[in-house]
Image (cartoon, rainbow, N blue to C red):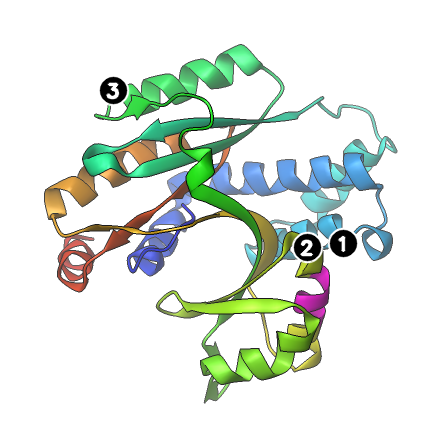
Amino acid sequence: MSGHSKWATTKHKKAVIDAKRGKLFAKLIKNVEVAARLGGGDPAGNPTLYDAIQKAKKSSVPNDNIDRAVKRGSGAESGGADYETITYEAYGPAGIAILIECLTDNRNRSASDVRVAVTRNGGTMADVGSVQRLFSRKGVVVVPKRQGDRELVEDDLLEAALEAGLEEVTDEGETWEARCDPADIVEVRKAVEAAGMEYDSAEVQFVASFDQEVDSVEVATKVFRIIDALEDSDDVQNVYTNLDLTDEVAAALENED
């Protein structure tokens, strides 16, 4: 789940559970394959592929799986699927906006999976464009605050990447998010690396233009139920929301986990 939420660290820990690990690997491999198909199999000349490979490696996807995905995508090996990106829009409880990005080779299957995940868990599908207008495309570089024996502060990122196109830095708990225009993401990522910082991922995402604060554990739980059901679908690649939890709700959910 992507989106500003003080519960992001808990979601990340949950995602490491073995039952979800296989699905995560499959989605990261699919990302690599599509990036290779669109921009060629050489990471040096295809920054989208480079970043997809780095993200897969940081999530411990085996190198053999990554290499095969690059070969399938670039046509060096047979078996590549013809994936297309489709975006679906929905609302959760309390009007929380949900944007669902699918990477699929079967449009009908993904539409059905998304609709069932949303409606069976208390959400509603939205008219085309009604939710997407609440989000904008941004380049997002996720940088852990803890870097070896030092703790990064916001100014460290601003100093490193402002001239590369960095627009804002947001606090996501254990990480900083460095946001920029999608066209500047490679330069911002390179600036972060040049400053000696480790980063978790660098990719173009949907970012909500405003956050919807939720001060109810019950509402937050229902929203996360929808997100979990969506992420269980093999076709769903990313789920974005404008959910923002109060500190009290975030703490309550942490204690439940």
Q: Does 189 appear in magenta?
A: yes
Q: Which residue is mark 3?
A: 120
- For disc 3, the neighbor class at 10 Å (few under 14, some 14 to 19, many from 20) is few
Residues at badges 1 and 2 in contact (C-beta under 8 Å)? Answer: yes
Tell me which numbered mark, 3 or 2, is placed earlier along the sequence: 2
Q: Is residue 180 left or right of residue 127?
A: right
Amino acid type of the residue that numbered disc 3 sits on in the rendered structure: Arg
Tell me which numbered mark, 1 or 3, is placed earlier along the sequence: 1
Q: Does 204 appear in magenta?
A: no
Cα separation, mark 1 vs mark 3, equals: 39 Å
Q: Is residue 167 left or right of residue 250?
A: right
Q: Which mark is residue 47?
A: 1
- Vertical comparison of 161 with 17: above or below: below
Span colored in magenta: 186-190
x and y, in percent, of residue 155 in the image: 50, 84
Name the residue: 20% across, 34% down.
93
Cα separation, mark 1 vs mark 2, equals: 6 Å
x and y, in percent, of residue 1 in the image: 40, 45
- For disc 2, the neighbor class at 10 Å (few under 14, some 14 to 19, many from 20) is many
